[in-house]
Amino acid sequence: MTNYMNVSQYIARFLKEAGVERAFELSGGMIMHLIDCIHQEGGVQLVNVYHEQSAAFAADATGRLSGIPGVAFGTSGPGAINLLTGVGSSFFDSSPAVFITGQVNRHEQKGTREVRQLGFQETDVVSMAKPITKWAYAIRDASEVPECLYRAFSVATSGRPGAVLLDIPMDVFRSPVAGFFRAWKPGFRTPDVKLQPDRVEQVVTLLRGAERPLILVGAGVRAAGAHAQFLKFVDRVDIPVVHSLLACDVLPYGHRQRVGMIGTYGNRWANLALSECDCLLVIGSRLDIRQTGADTDSFKRGRTIIHVDVESGEINNRVSDCIPLNCDIRDFLEGMLDCPAVGRPVWERWISDRRREWPDTAELKGVHGINPNVLMHRLSASRDVAAYCVDVGLHQMWAAQSLELGEETRFLTSGGMGAMGFALPAAVGAALHLHGARPVVVIAGDGGFQLNIQELQSIVHHRLPVKIVVANNHCHGMTRQFQDTYFDKRHAGTVWGYSTPAFHRIAEAYGIASMRIENAEQVDVAAEWFWREPLQPCLLEVEIDLTTNAYPKLAFGRPISQMEPLATPLEMEAT
């Protein structure tokens, strides 16, 4: 259709027709024209949050869950900069998202003048965003908007998904756009890199010839929209599956082929299986240092590694000599659906024996007070949860090691960026996307929870079924554990000079039901209270002893099978 409208009106209509149900924002002068037009157009809910970082994290969660880019707005200067942590998190974790920032009027921009700033809040956010986006662009004229918007949504969702940022001057928002409206519709595009049939035959041959085959699945499976194909493939091929941190939700807890999480804080039995396999099929996982450890020679020694990824640069990067399959993951899995069952009962029994030998709930021997791994099992067993939104820290590892996820349960956390403060705003995005039909659970530590604690008001304002667990160990636990190992227990900045409020009382101030527990005998009572009203928000503050660590933990510099506290690091961690 031919139409005459201004840029803000065009964006409002574009978002609605693209299937975007809501946009997250904190109002500011340079985006007010856009916000007003979206309000008048209707069809896209404007969700006001209380910090722009929260808007970005909420958009990240929405994009991961829907496959349609999550959308967030920020005004010029501090608003745009505040978005950037969440922009980077979306980029690193392959979450499709489009961020629109306001910029000062074109006649107020400094251009080539040798001054720091001309217009009030003028900031070159595009230069800052380029390293953490798939595409970042400063629009200069209204005529660019139709093509740039279409490209932004296409880039955000194609190949390996990620973040895109468009910066638009205030006067451009008010400028007219003439011409044809170019709509974008959701759906994965035809893969750029096609899988050759002979490569499928090669993989089948290698898997069938292995005595101890293993699949390592990463977040790339969901990012490719290939979750259904992966489930069919695993059921057919009958090979044990280990997963990365970001792929905790690819197989449900009770799936017969699910082994557990691998990596720095992986389940001990899963890391042992990884170290003993003779053929490893890696699907959509980066093989970064937190998965393989620093000793990549021992990681690849004695096994064939087949690496499937849509990004060629991720293959044979840190871990060399892999058999490369640079292709779309969904394309690969569909090609593998005729693979005959492999099935190795002796190998599966060996893994099961290791699981019984090294249960996750027994890793913290002699723990004082509440065992966090036991807590995770108790809170999650047989619960219908839409998503767990997990913050960054020791609690993140306890959750990934021990949560019992259902078939329709998602696990959302900040992996590559590792951003504290992610969980609560992500839960806002997740709960809104799911229309409050099922509960969303936040698992946070006392440190990360304080970064975006203001979003408790978003929970209350939108009446969201978000249930919150704050594991309060009165310190920055992960870095405190690091100090114990490498800095002779000097706790500067983690224990010394740090303190926490009474989170259960803060929840009450927001009008959220709360409870606090401090010993193991209270866990069952707390779990019953927590789930008494599944769709009502609540906050459970759990006192965790300050000295409680996350174990097992890879002993840095050693092979993946050697983990603390049974082994000691050879050198200081590099990450």
Image (spheres, rainbow, N blue to C red):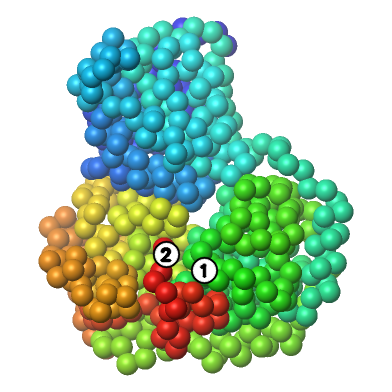
**Distance (Cα) linking label 2 and label 1:** 8 Å
Report the disc number at residue 574.
Answer: 2
Residue 515 visible (yes or no): no
The residue at 54%/92% (across/down) is: 357
First along the sequence among labels 2 and 1: 1
The x, y position of residue 349, in whole percent, is 68, 88
Q: Amino acid at mark 1?
A: Ala
Please name whichever residue, 150 or 117, is drawn nearer the observer in this view of the structure: 117
The x, y position of residue 417, in whole percent, is 41, 53
Bin the neighbour count of mark 2 within 10 Å (Cα to Cα): few under 14, some 14-19, many 20 and up. Answer: few
The residue at 41%/69% (across/down) is: 573
Q: Amino acid at mark 2?
A: Ala
Residue 108 visible (yes or no): yes
The x, y position of residue 411, in whole percent, is 47, 61
- Check disc 1 and report the residue beneath it: 294
Q: Looking at the picture, does residue 139 appear above or below residue 209?
A: above
Within the image, what quadrant is residue 206 found in?
bottom right
Q: Looking at the picture, does residue 314 appear above or below residue 123?
A: below
Q: Is the residue under label 1 in contact with that under label 2 (CB below 8 Å)?
A: yes
User: The N terminus is located in which quarter?
Assistant: top right
User: The C terminus is located in which quarter?
Assistant: bottom left
